[in-house]
Image (cartoon, grey):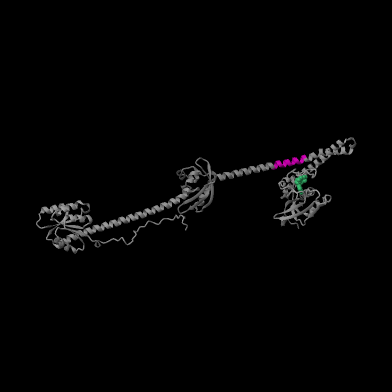
Amino acid sequence: MNANEVVLSEPASPATEFPSNGSVHSPGASDLKASILLVDDRHDKLLAVETILSTLHQNIVTATSGKEALRRLLKEDFAVILLDVSMPGMDGFETAALIRQRPRCEHTPIIFITSIGNTENQISQGYALGAVDYMLTPIVPEVLRTKVSVFVELHKQTQLIKFQAEQLRQFEQYRYQQELAYVADRLEIETRRNRFFTLAQDMLAIGNFDGGLLQVNASWTKTMGYSEEELKGLTGFDVVHPDDREKLTAGLTALKSGTALPTFEGRFRHKNGSYIWLEGTATPFLEEKLIYIFTRDITRRKEAEEKIVHLNRELEHRVAALTEANAELEAFNYSIAHDLRTPLRSMSGFARALLEDETANLTPLGLEYATRVARSAKYMDSLLLDLLAYSRLARAEMVPGPVNLEEPINELLTVLDQEIRERKAKVEVNSPLGEVCAHTPTLKQILSNLIGNSLKFTAQGRPPLLSIFTSKHPGFVRLWVEDNGIGIAPEYHEKIFGLFQRLHDSNNYPGTGIGLALVKKGAERMGGRAGVESELGKGSRFWVDLPAIEPSHDRK
Ligand code: ADP
């Protein structure tokens, strides 16, 4: 496992057994040895008592004065003190009085030893000082042993209880610490889990089967505007958009049957009254009757989508309007070009009449003017004819069919035969060219323009060399018309396909600037495209893409 991985497993339950390392063991009363303090100024008496008590196998400590006894008591606990009453200096009573003043031994049993003949008065004084018993000398060994052993036993029991109490306290303390550690572990794990919940950007929630929310993270309050308490008091049905209510009901029904919703989308009311688009997933837990919900605000995305739909609709309207306007313009263009030819015919007719019938009546300047009028009228007529051809091409209904490319090309070369010869041109046709789906008259118009241009735009002194060939591509055939002419700089490759675009002066290269516009329009109308590859001075290769004949269209 990676050292940085965070493990969110449950902590082990707190230990209920006190760990045993062998050092703690609970002794029995018999294991303990009690200490007995003998106090007497006479060594022989001390020895006698010590001998009597030795059979008890306890720890016997002797002191020969009250002072020494007090010193001993400072260091050790005793089960019982045997105190001689009559001692020189500090007697037994004075010693007992001092013993009782010390908290450590205020309850230690004291047995006074005194000789017979002491007064009753002395005995009661002894009791007043806390003596628990009296022994009169001469001592009867059995009696002394019995009395002392009672106190020894009592002391041992007390010690045992104290020991057990201490052990119990230690065990309780240990258990308490274990519980504390367990709770601390749990708390840490919960805190980490909660961090995911509270820090998530997404809206996380736990809901019930009625559509209510039991727990929500901060993103909910931020997105929906309600406080956590308000959210917990609402159900989805209180805030769902009327149009999405049915969807919510269906979703909840599916969840209640145990089916997770991999994705859902709907509008829910913000506190300010606006609707927020939410998108997410929901997973039910049938046993707990809980639903785990992950959602996010997609209002912006939805608004953008709606805007795009709106813009698209607007665009469609505009395209329709433009198409209509274009059609009107083309119709207008056609009718103008058509109608202009009538007055033009009369202009060129009168110019010709002047030049043919009135030459004698005209001055040389008048003759030149009439020549110019005739030439301009001729140019204008070819312009109008080209415009009419273009308009027709744009408007005409076209039903393309299979065309073997060699047929229109050979036909055209026959028509152009004289011009080819005059220009000393050479035309190579790289058969077979293949079949395309085209509209033959339009295809002829295209080829006529391309071949015508290749024959026209040639460098002086260099006879035109034309090559016509095709290349096959998926779905279409590319027809090439290559020449060795003056070529076209790359920056004009697109421009020349526009209406009235000409790169050369009309003295050297006459023309109307409509031919290539017609090529482009025609190719497009047949479902193809047109273009050129060329460099200035290095010839040109014009191409037209035309739909290839699919095998099913093959003629039998
Ligand atoms: P036009 O031939 O009547 O001038 P086009 O539309 O056919 O008009 O051609 C537009 C212009 O493109 C021509 O005027 C000429 O400058 C250039 N062009 C067309 N074909 C060629 C060619 N094969 N070689 C060089 N320039 C050409």
Specify the farthest residue to the left: 117
Q: Position of residue 240 (x, y in %)?
A: 52, 44
- Residue 353: % across, % down: 87, 38
Q: Position of residue 57 (x, y in %)?
A: 21, 63
Residue sitting farthest toward the bottom: 55
* Residue at 22%, 52% in the rendered image: 103
Q: Say which residue appears at 41% left-offset and 53% top-offset.
A: 186
Q: Nearer the viewer, residue 346 or 538?
A: 538
Q: Is residue 507 left or right of residue 271?
A: right
Q: In the figure, residue 46 lies in which quadrant? A: bottom left
Query: Which residue reaches farthest right?
Result: 360
Frontmost residue, 227 versus 196:
196
- Say whether residue 537 is visible: yes
Which is more toward the observer, 324 or 378? 378
Residue 136 against residue 459 in the figure, above or below: below
* Residue 396 in sight: no
**392, 428: nearer the viewer:** 428
7 is within the stretch colored magenta: no
Quadrant position of the C terminus in the picture: bottom right
Magenta residues, start to end: 323-336
Q: Which SS type dominates the magenta stretch?
A: helix
Percent across and percent down for residue 402 are: 75, 54
